[in-house]
Image (cartoon, rainbow, N blue to C red):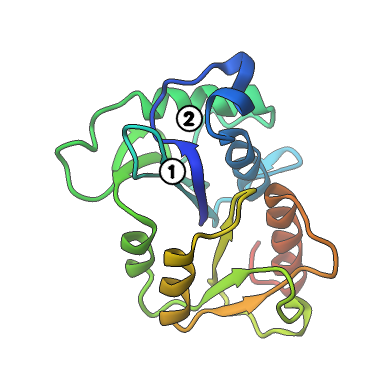
């Protein structure tokens, strides 16, 4: 789960200026690639949630499911086009919960807090700088990993995460880009056998 504090929740962004016209949605697009794609394959047992808090249509969440997703390409532009087409849908305006708008891609109205509430009973790990190293942490077989975008978390989200008894961990002494953090976390899970 990645919380994009400025990432636009609408399809009104320019593919030729993704970083400048979308509230840095490019950070989240690269994270989709990092979360789901491997060399010549897709992680069938993974899913990623993008919580989009910027723009007129916010808040919205986009869910990508590796098991059913189709047409995932590793380049940023192709993933941005898929996301743009998905965000153009208004299917989530009237329907509660997630509505599939493309194979393996669903959208929903709602906040980060609402999404976090759906993970009751699953351990929540928050990646944050200065926290204990993830290599020293016990990780559940199906962890929910929560990351911020390039701006981190706002105070309200931080308070909500603390109230949910999350486990804070870091990926080392150097701050990483969000998509790189997703790659390192997947590698850690792969090494432990938590993902196939």
| Nearest-to-viewer mark from 1 and 2 | 1
Name the image quarter holding residue 45. Answer: bottom right
Disc 2, SS? helix
Tell me what residue is drawn at x 68 percent, y 76 percent: 169
Disc 1, SS? strand
Residue 194: mark in rendering? none
Q: Position of residue 168 (x, y in %)?
A: 62, 77
- Answer with left or right where residue 110 lies relative to residue 15: left
The one nearer the camera, 188 or 163, is 163
Tell me what residue is drawn at x 50 percent, y 60 percent: 154
Q: Position of residue 29 (x, y in %)?
A: 59, 36
Tell me what residue is drawn at x 84 percent, y 63 percent: 174
Name the image quarter holding residue 74. Answer: top right
Q: Quadrant of the C terminus?
A: bottom right
- Answer with left or right where residue 5 lies relative to residue 152: left
The one nearer the camera, 24 or 62, is 24
134 lies above or below 34: below
Name the residue that disc number 2 marks. Answer: 83
């Amino acid at each position: 789960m990645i919380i994009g504090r400025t990432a636009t929740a609408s399809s009104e962004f320019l593919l030729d200026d993704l970083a400048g016209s979308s509230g840095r949605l490019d950070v989240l697009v690269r994270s989709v690639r990092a979360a789901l794609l491997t060399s010549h394959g897709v992680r069938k047992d993974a899913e990623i949630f993008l919580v989009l808090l910027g723009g007129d249509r916010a808040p919205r969440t986009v869910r990508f499911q590796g098991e059913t997703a189709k047409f995932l390409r590793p380049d940023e532009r192709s993933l941005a086009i898929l996301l743009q087409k998905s965000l153009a849908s208004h299917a989530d305006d009237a329907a509660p919960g997630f509505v599939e708008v493309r194979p393996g891609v669903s959208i929903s109205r709602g906040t980060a807090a609402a999404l976090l509430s759906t993970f009751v009973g699953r351990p929540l790990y928050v990646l944050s700088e200065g926290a204990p190293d993830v290599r020293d942490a016990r990780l559940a077989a199906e962890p929910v990993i929560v990351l911020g975008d390039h701006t981190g978390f706002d105070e309200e989200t931080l308070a909500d995460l603390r109230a949910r008894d999350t486990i804070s961990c870091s990926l080392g002494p150097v701050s990483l880009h969000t998509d790189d953090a997703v790659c390192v976390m997947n590698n850690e899970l792969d090494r432990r056998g938590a993902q196939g």
